[in-house]
Every structure is written in structure tokens, then in C-alpha cells.
Image (spheres, rainbow, N blue to C red):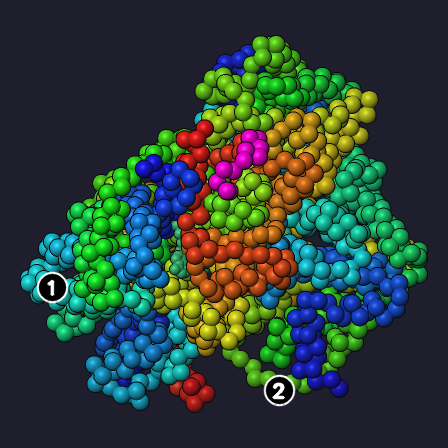
Amino acid sequence: MTATADIVARCQTLFDDLHFTYAREWKAAVPGRKVVGYMPFYVPRELIHAAGALPLGVLGGGDQLEVIHGDAYYQSYICRIPRSTVELGVTGRLDFVDGMLFPSICDVIRNLSGMWKIMFPKVKSRYFDVPQNFRNDVGGEFYINELNELRDMLAELGGRAVGDDAIRASIALYNENRRLVRDVYALRSKQPWKTPSAEVYLLMRAGMILAVEEHNRLLSEYLAAAPQEDRPRRDNSRVVVTGVFCEQPPLNLIKSIELSGCYIVDDDFMLVNRWERSDVPVEGDPIRNLALAYLHDSGDTSAKYEPDQKKKGLYLVDAVKRSGAEGVIFAAPSFCDPALLERPMLQSVLAAHGVPYIAFKYAENSGQMQPIREQAGTFADSIKLWSEQ
Amino acid sequence: MRCFIGIDLGSTTTKAVLMDEHFEVLGRGITNSRSNYDTATRVAKHEALINTRFTLFHRALSVLPDLGGKLDQFLGDLERNFRLEQFLDQLADLERTCLANVKGERFKGKERAVGEALAAVFVRLREEAPALFARDAKRKSDFFRDIAGSRFMTVAQEIAKASALSYDLMLNVYDKAIIDVENRPPAGEMKDKYLKALERVAASAPEFGGLVGRIAGPVREGLEIPLEETYLVGTGYGRVTLPFSKEHIRSEILCHGLGAHIMYPQTRTVLDIGGQDTKAIQVDPAGIVENFQMNDRCAAGCGRYLGYIADEMNMGLHELGPMAMKATRTVRINSTCTVFAGAELRDRLALGEKREDIMAGLHRSIILRAMSIISRSGGVRDQFTFTGGVAKNEAAVKELRQLIRENYGEVAININPDSIYTGALGAAAFARRAVEH
Amino acid sequence: MSAMPVTEAVKEQSMLKQKEMIAANYELLATAREAGRKVVSTFVPGNLNELMMCFDVVNNLPEINAIQNGMRKKTGGYIMEAEKRGHSEDVCTYVKADIGAIAKGNLGPDGRPLPDPDLLLLSYTGCFTFMKWFELLRQQYKCETAMLHVPYEGDGKASKNMRDYVVKQLKEEVIPKLERVSGVKFDIDRLRQYLRESAKAEENFVWVLESAKKRPSPIDAYFGGVYYIGPIFTAFRGTADATEYYRLLRQEIEQRVADGLGPITPDGEMHQERYRLVVEGPPNWTSFRDFWKMFYDEGAVVVASTYTKVGGVYDLGFRHDPEHPLESLAEYCLGCYTNRNLPSRIDLIEKYVKEYEADGLLINSIKSCNSFSAGQLLVLREIERRTGKPAAFIETDLVDPRYFSPANVKNRLESYLQMIEQKRQGATPSAAAE
Amino acid sequence: MTVTAGIDVGTGAVKAVLFEVQGDQTRWLVRRTERVRQRDPFKLAEQTYDGILDEAGLKRGDVAYVATTGEGEALSFHTGHFYSMTTHGRGAIYLDPATRAALDVGALHGRAIRLDARGKVLSYKMTSQCASGSGQFLENIARYLGIAHDEIGMLSKKADNPEKVSGICAVLAETDVINMVSRGISAPNILKGIHSSMADRLAKLLKTIGTIDGAVLMTGGLALDDGLVAAMQEAMLKEKVSYPVRSHPDSIYAGAIGAALWGAFRHEKLVRLGELAKAS
Ligand SMILES: Nc1ncnc2c1ncn2[C@@H]1O[C@H](COP(=O)(O)OP(=O)(O)O)[C@@H](O)[C@H]1O
Ligand SMILES: Nc1ncnc2c1ncn2[C@@H]1O[C@H](COP(=O)(O)OP(=O)(O)O)[C@@H](O)[C@H]1O
Ligand code: SF4
Ligand code: SF4
Ligand code: SF4
């Protein structure tokens, strides 16, 4: 059995590699293979996979990339992920990527799709829209057509048709992936001391790079190995971290939260891994199945409209209950409109349900963790000092 | 003779360049802007006039055969002694002002003790002064505020301790006085100071002793040449607050572009890092600005950042670069927020990083930010000229060279020891042109 | 974002007309409750004014309220209020100005409270923040919300799928909700009538904008332009009043052209046209006058702006079409400036720089508005590359006075204009070089 | 009888206290503040700790629980660490039991902390990164103006026509101030201007943390600046809030006090659980 440390080391190597060696090698292994990049947080990876291409999550440059040219394209009041992504592009680190998908999440990513078309004309770039109307006959129809357009684009890119059967097979693989991911999350919420969040994070990040088959293997190995670890249980409080669906926090931030006394028992890192909450049906029209899963079975996040005022924010309360959390940490990228505008709404729902919360902002390259430790620590203190009285 | 003056009112320093009608630079002057802009202008101009005199001496003396290869040495001695004269003058002023400030609630009952302590401090400072201006002495800065200030603090700390006075109290007296002194234009007859300096040289440097008779004549002649201010152009950060009319003002972008062009006619890209802003300017072969970019309102990563770091470490600005050069590795620093520079530094020290390595990282981060602004303005074209106060910092220069090579290949990089005067030089050239047309 | 009204400086007939129209609409709003009329809040870009008129509802535009409050220097306090209530310093200040104003009694410009909306019509064109904004308002008012999701023209064009989707939402979502809230049955012929009226106004509006191609330009297409877009971008498109306004406006401008006059400024006639600029990005409202003055003092005229296209890029030929009412509304929503992808925006600006013979492009980058701002530095580069004309960049905010630094803006603007001037004098030999 | 120590390692100053605790009875033994000013804060903390032990005639072994707060997590000789807001809250309640919110203003930060009667942190808000409203900034300006930091308050209260300072960035604000000096604005008016800008920001923090039904106690070094306290009171008046904002002569010790008291609390609990061995 592979030891946890080895699995994590593998993930760390993938995480640190800003040249995407794995994806380059995957592509070079068989002539004609294509790589399709996508920005956070959601794209139907099944279609990319079915087209024989590797879906590659592009999640910015983290805290190790020196951004020079990227800053030349963005004012200081715009978040960091687009600039480090541009840096990756301009410095040739993404030169093996054949297609790029920019999901509909905010105006920044939306405009980046147009910039990519201008700056990298050889890459097939597409703004990928999803419906905000959740009726089958309205938003559903629109989305089915969008998916079909994407399918055509991928077919053109790969030089071969993307058949229904191929999509069905991919759906099955990704169902498996989502199941394993759910299991990891369940394990962590049960025994957070055995599954440090930094590890779980790296494991999820690996899913943005590895071929799904390989990621599935890695997840299974981790699920087998982690419970065997002998790790001391600490006197920590249990929290849900939310608001991080796009620009990623530095790994140190995740570590700092745990070091200062909080176990993260649920989060919205790498939502694409858990986008559909249950299996997407494999039988029947696969495009339609994907569309319906999006409409009725997808996770909530601030980039999605909630038609029903009464349901607004309840998903977070559910997450708290399900994971047995004692509080919520809102950690959002600085200058992120979707996360920061959503925050007061979610907070009022939490307040109404008596769930304590704290909030702070970060940037993918934040270096100073002192304020973060201060806040997470105080939060943990207050739970620790008062809970047993 | 007709003189054309360019003034660059920077956020930290004010620079003046004085030019004759052949576009020949005669003198340069610099002072702290951290006071009153009018005074700063006056002082910088004054300094440039002093410097001009030395140029004129040089011209007059270079025809003398006797000095031969020793001319520069002589002028250097003369200038240092002149500076010493000025320094002693200002020190006396500072002492008077300090003493006058020892009154009021805070000093009640302690007037005498503080007065005595101050007197003791100034005795020490006066004693030390000649050494500060000796041939190979390294000074922390060229400004009276900095030189006198750092010595005052060290000496005052010892004396305060010995006489059981609070160090804070002594500092407070100084802080109050220095502002007044700084804002007072140098008093006294200038000519006397040159002549006194000449005497000092004669007395202290035997090799020139015998020549004084013959040197004095040309020096006196140099002092007699009238310098008439024909036209003045102001530029820089502070220009809007000056009582200059519109014709006497040019944007700092144009001035830096032209100044760099004058120094290096092949220049196509200019980077200027000043106290509060960083600008990247693209110029055409005639020195005309084609494009420029500046940092936005955030002052992160500008020269003042180094100032905060220097304060934090109780070092002079001159000393930061050399320390960074000793680094064996570069610590990654992602935030260049000036205000939190100190906190960042402490954070890293607490993590056990070495000072030199952190310092190297801080310099790199400033340059990275500048690189972004360059990139925003259209990148680096051959030749590249680096100007502004930070160009004096060797560690910053080293990082810049390396990053330019990595990102733009081999290009000629010009850095002039007088690069801090680039804006003023451009302004002076505009002044000269204004009269021509 | 959008149009704004109310100036005292010069009393042209068209201006008086506009003032009346605006006052009347605020009157309607203030008395809506007593008059038993329903109030619908909606956004400027891609607004469905003609459709709303079919239901006799009163139109309330939070963006316009924010602008009005910005010009009256109230937004600083409102924004602070919203931040005190937990809103981040980082997000769009229109939203915060609105939320803060509501917290402080939600007074209209006439000092009377604005009514709570009966329906939030969330037509979601060109900006994601709109969606959050109305979710926030919905939480406050607990009222009915109709969502019209307008897909983004990611490939630079509206596809059939997009149009069908919008039309279907109009039919299935928007119209039924408007019917339910207002109690008025939808009548497509009424809609056709209003659209016919819109098209007439649009024709004259485009003429006015294009008059800036003349030398000297009779209008300032940015600072003056924000007044000209008022009626057509807001609650008046489709009304006879708007048609009349644009007829008057056109007459006045025709006269200026005949007289060879430049634009009117708050300080009177502008004398010499020294620089012709294209401007991208919304203006700053809190220091609107000071901002404008920096331009006309230097003789800089804006001959074309993109901001005057946020409520429709009419100069590319689009007109509301009574023959295809819903399709034409869909087309309209899809085609607003910020709903077009970045390459299309750049093409448009390039066209303006060339056709209006501008000296260059000035970008006023707005901190609040990612929809406009994210990517503007690439716009700048591309325009310089394609036109050979210099571009410049300044940064301000819409209604947050903390982000308008006059010295900073002035410094950049002056440097830019001096640079244009220096270039124009061309290769005056630099005597200095020798 | 138990002796506990609280050590607050700040960026501006190190604060240390010793407490004697017996059940509900507490006795404050000694206190000491040392300004950091270009010294190593950790060495300074250790010296300060030994210093107060000396003063109290105690040895390290006599102290049952050494609690650190602030940036003291890394100190080798502590028993446990509590985070600043936890300790400032507790300290504030100790100094003034009517307190329901602490407003901690230190060298580089400002925090508003809402509390319940027992000192539990209910909510908080910190100033964001760009901060001209910090003690450090005020100190720089005062130095520039030639004013000692304990004179600031007195001068500020003499202002007749305060001049506002831009609130975005300390660097730019510094230039503002320099311009003011050259325009002949008096030191009191400049200082008051800075105080008012700071107070506005701090008032905003207080408003953000929710309804406060009790007093607000200013803690941290700047609570000693009565000019800021006065500006704060004016700002709250403008906000029309009903609760008083005040300071306490020992406000600067709030963090250290809180640490010592929480240390005592934890100590007792650990003794009860017989887990003392594990705690060190
Ligand atoms: N001798 C020096 N060594 C290193 N850095 C220096 C030196 N002199 C000045 N600087 C740096 O240059 C900055 C001032 O640059 P300057 O071009 O004069 O700015 P400004 O024009 O804004 O006044 C200072 O903040 C400092 O960081
Ligand atoms: N008497 C005083 N008047 C005004 N300010 C003071 C006084 N004493 C300390 N300060 C200020 O308090 C700050 C230190 O506060 P403190 O709460 O100890 O901060 P930290 O915990 O970050 O070190 C210093 O910046 C200093 O300027
Ligand atoms: S971090 Fe937020 S604002 Fe930035 S790209 Fe992502 S979603 Fe958009
Ligand atoms: S405080 Fe720092 S980040 Fe903020 S504007 Fe100033 S330098 Fe920039
Ligand atoms: S982000 Fe821009 S378009 Fe969106 S609401 Fe704000 S100002 Fe308007």
C-alpha cells in the first residue's frame, strides 16, 4: 500500500510544477493528443475527456510565481488570478495547451476570455456560458445547445467526432471520481486530525491536473492510507471554509488555519470536483443528462443565481450541520465581487441560524499569515474556552 | 552669464540643474523635499549654484600648468572643506535652535540639565565633524538632516544615559529643531566660505600649500562671474503647488524623457524609480515621449519603501544596497506595501531568515514591480536608461540587470551617477529651449 | 452605469425638456403608492423600458439614483454606511451607494422617499454584479424578482441559441411576472407602438453622436454625452417625450454646426479645440465638474466615448424593430457595449479613433467596475498598436469620492496632452542632443 | 494561590504583567511596558519577563502558567498562547466590567471586538491592510513634527480647524501632512485631522460588529492618546450611538491582562483534568 506521505509528495510535486510537466508528458506520449485548459470553477470535464483530450485546471500562479507581465494587464484593484494566469501564458508555460475554456463566473474571467483570443490566437478559446434559468424548457434547452456547441468545438480540435457512447463512458468515470472525492470529504469531516486540510487540498488540486483515471487511483489509495496514520488529535474547533471557489488561497493559509486551532471540515475549494452532488445518469441522452444535472443537482455558489429567496444561503447551513462544524470562516480573494457581494447575504442567513462566523480576505500570493492566524486563532479560542462551560 | 535652471520637485528630494546657453551642465544641486517646497526649490537652486562655482573653478584652474594631474584632487579637497564649513554653520544653527526649544511644560525643572547635555552633545558633534569630511570618509547621506541626525541620536543616547535624562526628551528637542534649521536657507556670505575652505586646504594638504598663491587668483575670478537666472522650468511631483506660471512647468514625464535622451541619445526606454512613483517612459530617437506608464495610487514598491526599511533597521539608505549584495539567497517577498514593509521584515526575521537574504528579496520585489510597469508601457527597447534615486542602489541595479536580461535579452543599460538629476536636466533643457524659440 | 441629468450651466431647450422629464418621473415615483401604480426596479444596460411601459408600471433605476446622489456628493456617506453594514471595501460602489441610501431613508433627488419596488426586474446584461445587487435588494424587500439572463457574446456575436433563450425567458418569465404584479394584460401591439417611437429617437440620437466627426466637434461626446444618453438609456425610451427631446437636441446641434461652434461647457462656450480624444470607461460622478474642467481648460474635446454605448451601440446600426418586437428586445439586450466581448470592444474603439480623427485614446478606469475595467490595459495596447495613436490611462471611481484624486488625474492628463503636443510638433530637432 | 504571567508581544511594545489568582480573587502584582524601537521583540520579551519577576521577587518556577499573546506564539518559555482578540476582550472586561466591546488600536492595526459579559468574543472587525490609521503612522508624523508621543493628545485637543488626511495609504498621507506643514497648518490641526480620520475608520469598525449594549473600552497603546480618545468620542456622537467610548489608564495592558487571566483559567482547568503535564 502506498503511504500517505508518498501520495501527498506526488500531489505536492504536481502542485509546485508551474511548467505542467505531467500534462506535457501526457500529451507527448501519444501523437495527436490535445490538452484543454479551464479556469475555475465549473466546466463539463466529461466532454473534454470524451473528446480524448486532457482537461487541465488552470488555477493561477500561487505564491511562487513572479508576476511581471501579468501585472501589466491589470489594475491593482483586480484580483490576482487573471494576472498570474496571463503570466503563465505570456511566459510560455501554457504553450502546450490547445484549447481554453473560460466559464461564466464573473466579469474578470469573462473578459479574460476575450484577452486570450487576442493574445493567444492559436489557442481555441471559448467563453463557456451556463444558464441562470433553471427550467428544463428554457435554461435547459439553452444549455443543451451550449453543450453541443462545445462538443463541436472539441470535435474540431481533436479531429474526431465526440460520440454519445464516449460521453457516457466519461460520465461513468467522473461519477466514480466524484464518489471518491465525496468519500475523502466524509473521511475528513469524521477524522480531521487524520486528514490535514493541506493534504486534502493537494489531493483535490491533483485532480485538476491528472487524468481522471489516475486521480481516481490516487484518491482510492489515500482513502486506504490516511485512516491508518497515527496522528494526534488536537483540541481544535471545527469550521467550514467558504468563498474560495476561484482564486486559490496559498497553501500556507490553509495550514495557518489549522495551526491556529481550526479543523476545516468542509470547504468550497475546487468545486468542479464536486459539482454534481450525486451520480449523473449514464443511460439515455448524455448531453441532456449533463444539462439536467447542472440544472437540478449542482452545488450552490455565488456565481449561480438562486431563484428562491427563501432558499438563499441554506446550502451553507446544511454544510455546517452535515459536517458537524462549529463555525464558518469566510475566506475570499481580495477584490472578488462574487464572493464579497455574496458574503453579507450568507452571513445574515448564518446569523439567523445561530452559526458563528468570521471573515477575511487573501490573495493567492499573500505572504503574511499573522493576521490570519490572529483571526482564526481567536475564533478557535472562543470556541475552545467557552464550549465546555 | 546667462543660466537656465531646471527644478525637479520630487516627493523626497528636490533637484536643480543649471545649464549654460550651450546646453552644457554647469551645476547640480539636491536637497530634501520633506519640508517646504518653496524652500526646497530655493535650497536646491542654491546648491546648484555652489556646484556651478566649482565647475567654474575647474575651468579657470585647468589652464594652470602647476596643478597638472592633481586638479581633481584639489577641487575635491576644496569642496569637502567647503561642505565642512557649511556643516559647522548649520550645526551652530541647530545648537542655537535646540537650546531655544528647551522650555515649557515638558522641560520644567530640567532646563539646565537638558541645556548642559545638549552643549555636551554639540561639543562632541563639532569635534567629530572634520573626520566626517575627511578624504576617504563615507557619509550616511548628503543631507544635513541625515548626517547630523544619526550622529545626534548616537551621541545623545550616551549622554542622556550618563546624565540620567530621558533619551526621548533629547530626541524631541532635536526633532523640533531640525525642521526649523532645515527650512532656513544657509546664512552668511557665501564667498567667505569658499575662501575659508581654501585656507583649510592650504593648512591641511601640504601638497597644495605652496600653490595657494597662484590658485587663489583664478578662484576669486570664478567667484566674480555673475550668474544670471534667465529662465526656469519646474517639473515633478510638487510642481502644482509652486507659484510657477504655466509656461514654466513641464510634466515630469517629458522632462525625464528628454533628460535621459540628453544623457544617452540612443535611449528608447527610461525607467525612473523615485520616492513615491515609478514611471516607465518610451521615447523616440528625438527624445519625444511616445508612451508612459506610472504606478497607480498605491505607493508600494517605490523608493520610500526602502526608506521605511532603512528606518526599521536604523540604517542609512546608502547601506541597504551593500547589505543586500552580501546575500547568499533571495527570500521571496510578495508584498511591497510600503507601510507594512517593516512588518514583513520582522515576520521574515522571526522565521529565521538572514537579514541579507531578506534584503535581497526586498530589492527584488521592488524591481519586479517596476518590471511590470515597464511591461505595461510596452517593454524594454535598446537602449535602456535607469534613473531616479533608486538607481543609486547597487542591489536594485543588479536585480534589474538580471531581470532585463531574462525578459528582454541583451540590451544596453545606462546608469549615470547623476541619474537622480535626469528630470531636472530635462527641465533645464526645456528652459533653454523656451528662450530660443 | 448610465446616463445622468441635471445641469444648471446652459439652458438649451433640450436641456430644459430633459429636466422636466426627469422631474416628472421622480414625481411619478414619489406618488406611485398613492396613485396605486406598481414600481419596478431595473438596470440601465439592456433595460426593457418599452416592455415595462406596456404594464403601466413606474420605472425606478438604482444606478441612476446612485449617479444623482454621486453628483450631489452624498454617496461618500452612503458607501460608508454600506461598509459599516458589512459590505467589503473592494466591491462595486454603485451597489454600496444604493444600499447605503436605502439604509438612510432612500430619498430621491427631490427629497422625497423613493418607493419600495414591487418587482425587481433583473435583466442581467454585461455585468455579473447586477445579479448580486438584486439578490441583495430582494433580501431587503422580499419582493418578487424576475430574472432575465442575457448570455454574453463571448464570440463577439449573438447566436440563434442566445436569442431564442432570451425571447423564451421574456415569454415565460418576464412577461408573466409583469402581468401578475401589475394586473395588466400584455398587449404586443402596444409594445410595437413604443418600439416605433424608440426607433425614431434612436435615429436622431445617432446623428447627434456622429456630429462629433465634424471639426470643431459641436459636442463633447463624453461629458456632454452623458446628458444626451439620459432619455434613451433610461425610463423614457419609447415615449413621445424622448422623441421630442432628440428632435430638439438635433436641431440645436445642427445650429452649432452651422455656426462652426464647439461644445458648451459648464463655463460657457469652449473656445479652441486643441485635442480630440476618444474615451473608454464611465466618468466619475462625485467630481464630475472638476473632472470635465481638466479637459476643457486644456482644449481637449471628447469626440467619441464607449460609455455612451452601454445602453445600446446604436451607431452600429441597431434599431428597435416593431416588426419583431421580442426578438428585437433580445437583440438589444445582447448587443449592449459591455455585453460584447473584448475583441469587439477593441474593434469599436479602433473604429472611433479612426473615423473621428482622434489624437488618441484615454481610458478612465473605474475601480468599481470589473465589467469595464478588467482588460482595459490590453485595450490600450491594442489601440496603440493598431492606430499608432498614443493612449493614456487614468484611474478613478464612479461614486466613491475616496478614489478621485484630482492631483493624480490632472498630472496624468496633462502629461498625456503635453505628450500629444510634443509629438505633433514632431521631430523638432532636439538641439540638446548635440 | 497561583501566580500567572501574561506577556503581550506587539510590534510597537512588549507588555508584561503578573497576577495572583485564587478562585475568583485576582490581584495584579506588577506590570511593565517596553517600547520595541528597533530591538528584537523576542529577546526583549524574555528580558521584560525576567524583569517583572525580579520586581515581584519571584523566580520562573513560581509561575504556574505563562500565557503569551500578540506575536508571542514563538516564545520558548510560555505555557500557552491566546490570540490577541481573546485576550484584549478579557482584559477589557477586567479593567471595566461594563465593557461590551473593546477597541484595540496598536502600532499597526485597529480592531473592534464585541464581547459578552464574560469576555467572550462575539464578533470583530479589523482594519484592512492599507492603513494610515495606525500608531506607527502617527508616531512617524509626530516625529516629523518634532512632537513626543505623549504630547500628541494634548496638542490635538487644542485644534481649532482640523485638516482631513487622505485615508488610503500612510505613504501618501505622509506627503499630505508634509504639504500641510508647508501650507502653514498648525501641528494641533494636523494631529487632530489624523485623529479624526482614524476615528472615522475606527467608528466604522465599531458599527460593523453589531449592536453593542454596554461601554466600549479602548485598549492598546493608542488608548493612551487622549486626543484620539476625544476624536473617537466625537465620531461616535456623529454616529448617534448611545454607548460610551472610553479609555483606562491601564488600557495598554489589556492584552497582557487577558492572557494572564485566561492562563489562570486554563491552569485551573488543566489541574482539574489532571492534564498539567501535557500542557507544557
Ligand atoms: N544613495 C542612495 N542609495 C540608495 N537609494 C537612494 C539613494 N538616494 C536616494 N535613494 C532612493 O531614492 C528615492 C528618492 O528618489 P528620487 O528620484 O529623488 O525621488 P523623488 O523624485 O520622488 O523625490 C529614495 O526614497 C530612496 O529610496
Ligand atoms: N502615551 C501614548 N500616547 C500615544 N500613543 C502611545 C502612547 N503609548 C504608546 N503609544 C502608541 O501605541 C503603539 C503601541 O501600541 P500597542 O498596543 O502596544 O501595539 P502593539 O501591540 O502592536 O505593539 C505605539 O505605536 C505608540 O505610538
Ligand atoms: S477571484 Fe473572484 S473576481 Fe477574481 S476571477 Fe475569480 S471569481 Fe472573478
Ligand atoms: S498602504 Fe500599502 S498597499 Fe496600501 S496604498 Fe499604501 S503602499 Fe499601497
Ligand atoms: S460592476 Fe460596473 S456594470 Fe456592474 S453594476 Fe457596478 S458599475 Fe455597473
Q: Quadrant of residue C201?
A: top right
Reading the image, the residue beneath label 2 is A230
Q: Does residue B46 appear in the picture of this structure?
A: yes
Residue occupying image coordinates x 39% and y 86%: D271
Reading the image, the residue beneath label 1 is B119
In the rendered structure, the residue with mark 1 lies on which chain? B
Dot 2 lies on which element? loop
In the rendered structure, the residue with mark 2 lies on which chain? A
Mark nearer the viewer, 1 or 2: 1
| Quarter of the figure that contains the N terminus of chain C | top right
- What segment is highlighted magenta in the picture? C424-434
Q: Amino acid at mark 1?
A: Ala
The front one of A7 and C385 is C385
Q: Magenta part mainly helix, strand or loop?
A: loop
Q: Badges 1 and 2: C-beta atoms under 8 Å apart?
A: no
Q: Does residue D189 appear in the picture of this structure?
A: no
Dot 1 lies on which element? helix
Return the x and y of residue D66 as percentages of the image width and height: 35, 81
Residue occupying image coordinates x 22% and y 48%: B220
